[in-house]
Amino acid sequence: SIFVNNGTFRKTAYSGRTSLGSMTVTNNGTFDAESGGIFFESGGTLTGAYNASTGAVIAFDGGGFVAGPTVNLTGAGEIALTGGSMELMTNVPSGLQFVGGTLNLSPSFQGGGMITNLTLSGATLFGNYTVAQTMTFQSGALNGSLTIGPSATLYITSGSHNLTSCQLTNLGTVYWSGGAMSPDGNSSVVNNSLWIAQSDDTFNNGGLIVNNGTYRKQG
């Protein structure tokens, strides 16, 4: 099934969720969550406008989504990828959080497929990527490979950080200020530059940890 929104779809009055299940959504208008939540369960292309007021949620929760360059996200509530998968074509839509599901980056993302600014807050980043400027890994998982470039910075903060069949290579600077790092047996962490541990946390599970640079404990 296909749901085409050419007007305004507004959720009001009740604190529960309105789910669009088993239908791919095409949005040429506005989805407006004034209370409760609007949950998209079967994917679609993110165009048009999405607004979540304070305390309300718009959740991309199932299926495959593509975030186009023209989507407009507003409001003080939460607008987030919570399940399914999403591909970012050119940039991160302002206001979009990645708290679950799987995130993929297109070859044209942020100008040539390199990460210049990305925050991961619970989702799984899937694929092989290079950080050219800044990435914040609050929580979630990495699957594939992630290289921190010579002039780039990775901030590892707060929650749990899982590496699943992932090769994490640091050629720049890593600031690890919170949350355990948990590489599985098919993963590796190789530091060829500067890794600064700013908290009392641990490397868990298995995997290969190699330090060819400087690992510094601060704080």
Image (cartoon, rainbow, N blue to C red):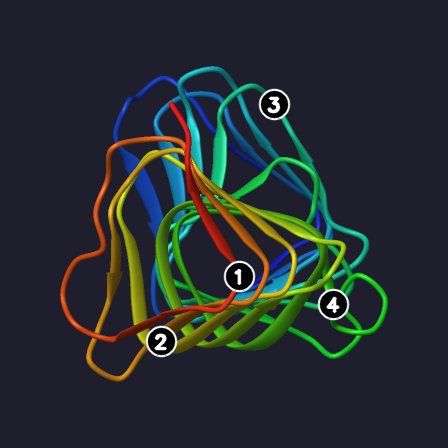
Q: Quadrant of residue 164?
A: bottom left
Residue at point 73%, 49% (across, down): 71
Image quarter hosting the N terminus = bottom left
Placement of 67 over or under 169, stated as above or below: above
Q: Which of marks 2 and 4 is nearer the N terminus?
A: 4
Q: How far apart are marks 1 and 4 (CA)?
A: 23 Å
**Label 1 CA crowd tier, 10 Å (few <14, some 14–19, many 20+):** some
Query: Which numbered disc, 1 or 2, marks the residue that appears first in the sequence?
Result: 2
Give the labeled residue for mark 4: 114
Residue 122 in view of the camera: yes
Question: Left or right: where does residue 174 sit relative to residue 20?
Answer: right
Screen quadrant of the C terminus: top left
Name the quadrant containing residue 85.
Answer: bottom left
Q: Do labels 1 and 4 touch, CB within 8 Å?
A: no
Mark 1 is on which residue type? Gly
Residue to which mark 2 is pinned: 188
Nearer the N terminus, badge 4 or badge 3? Answer: 3
Tell me, yes or no, whether the two marked residues, 4 and 3, touch with CB atoms within 8 Å: no
Q: Which kind of residue does numbered mark 4 sit on?
A: Met
Q: Which dot, 1 or 3, sits closer to the camera?
A: 1
Q: Nearer the viewer, residue 176 or 47?
A: 176
* Circle 1 residue: 213
The residue wearing badge 3 is 75
Where is residue 167 shown, x and y percent of the image?
A: 43, 77
SS under mark 3: loop
Q: What element carries label 1?
A: loop
What is the CA distance from the residue labelled 1 to the residue labelled 3?
Answer: 44 Å
**SS at mark 4?**
loop
* First reached walking from the N terminus: tag 2 or tag 3: 3
First-in-chain label (1 vs 4):
4
Give how far across and how far down residue 105 sits, in percent. 63, 70
